[in-house]
Image (cartoon, rainbow, N blue to C red):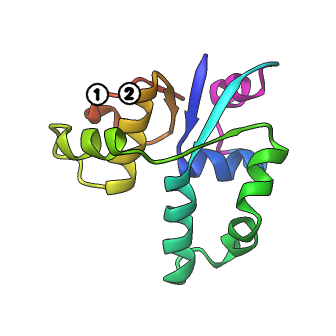
Amino acid sequence: MRLLLDTHTLVWWIRANPLLSAGARDAISVDGADVSVSIASAWEIAIKVGRGKWPEAREFLTAFEAGIADEGFTLLPITVPHVRMAGLIVSDHRDPFDRLLAAQAMTEGLTLVTSDSKVRSLGVTCLW
């Protein structure tokens, strides 16, 4: 299975947070799992750190690329097809990061690993 981690999923994985579901943990930890992390997650974390809403994530943000590489994850760039789809998804769900992650997952044939049930309204395949 090819996975894309939602931002909270990534942070919970890195911190071994018990809020990460057993299903998500099992899927991410499978030998040879194809796990991607979007550059949008770095952007989302940076905005929250910059606004003072997530100061404890500053250290993780500083070493974002190394942390992703250390986990064996692939960093997924943002492309024009991703942003086009994010804008054109018909849904009342307005969070731009959720829309972009959903669009990336759909465009790239990935399953989005998220606990956010609202994201499903975007039509993306999710796992939790």
Residue that extends furthest to the front in the rendered view of this protein: 80
Mark sitting earlier along the chain (1/2): 2
Does the residue at mark 1 contact the one at mark 2 (Cβ under 8 Å)? yes
Horizontally, residue 121 falls left or right of residue 75, namely: left
Q: Position of residue 73 (x, y in %)?
A: 72, 38
Report crowding for label 2: few under 14, some 14 to 19, many 20 or more residues within 10 A (C-alpha): some
Residue marked by disc 2: 106
Residue marked by disc 1: 123
Residue 117 visible from this viewpoint: no
Question: Which residue is depicted at the point 53% across and 82% down?
Answer: 50
Name the quadrant of the C terminus. top right
Residue bounds of the magenta highlight:
19-30
Q: Amino acid at mark 1?
A: Gly
Q: For the residues marked 1 and 2, what is the alpha-carbon distance in whole angstroms?
A: 8 Å
Q: Position of residue 71 (x, y in %)?
A: 80, 42
Q: Position of residue 83 (x, y in %)?
A: 31, 47
The disc placed on residue 23 is none
